[in-house]
């Protein structure tokens, strides 16, 4: 069973980041509702997945070795 994933694909990690940022924003007088935080986490997870795909494609294109 191989359930490993990279850190940036983890909703828990992004949830923690958003919670910290929302807390800091609250200190500055900006309030972010929990529902909005959930949407932000989903968006960040999707962006991380897209970035991972682009990096993989770029890595294959720029590689110096051929695939068999």
Image (spheres, rainbow, N blue to C red):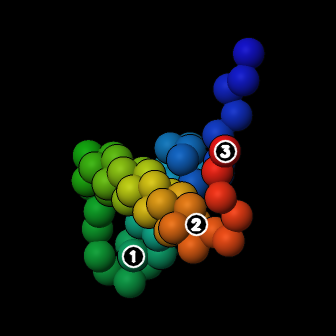
**What is the total number of numbered labels drawn onto the structure image?**
3
Mark 2 to mark 1: distance in Å? 36 Å
Image side of residue 67 versus residue 47, left or right: right
- Using a 10 Å C-alpha cutoff, classify the residue at mark 1 as few (fewer than 14 neighbours), some (14 to 19) or many (20 or more): few
Residue 34 in sight from this viewpoint: no
Horizontal side, residue 66 vs residue 18: left or right? right
**Nearer-the-camera pick, 24 or 36:** 36
User: Residue at horizontal 70%, vertical 64%?
Assistant: 65
Q: In the rendered structure, which disc, 3 or 2, sits on the residue that comes first in sequence?
A: 2
Number of other residues with Cα within 10 Å of mark 2, as a class: few under 14, some 14 to 19, many 20 or more = few
In this rendering, is residue 23 above or below 39? below
Q: Position of residue 19 (x, y in %)?
A: 48, 58
In-front residue for pair 28/55: 55
Q: CA distance from mark 3 to mark 2?
A: 16 Å
Residue at the spot of label 2:
59
Tell me the quarter of the picture where residue 54 sits. bottom left
Point out which mark residue 67 bears. none
């Amino acid at each position: 069973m191989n359930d490993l994933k990279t850190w940036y694909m983890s909703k828990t990690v992004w949830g923690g980041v958003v919670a910290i940022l929302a807390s800091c924003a609250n200190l500055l007088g900006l309030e972010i509702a929990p529902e909005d935080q959930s949407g932000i986490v989903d968006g960040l997870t999707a962006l991380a997945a897209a970035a991972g795909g682009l990096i993989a494609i770029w890595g294959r294109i720029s590689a110096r070795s051929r695939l068999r």
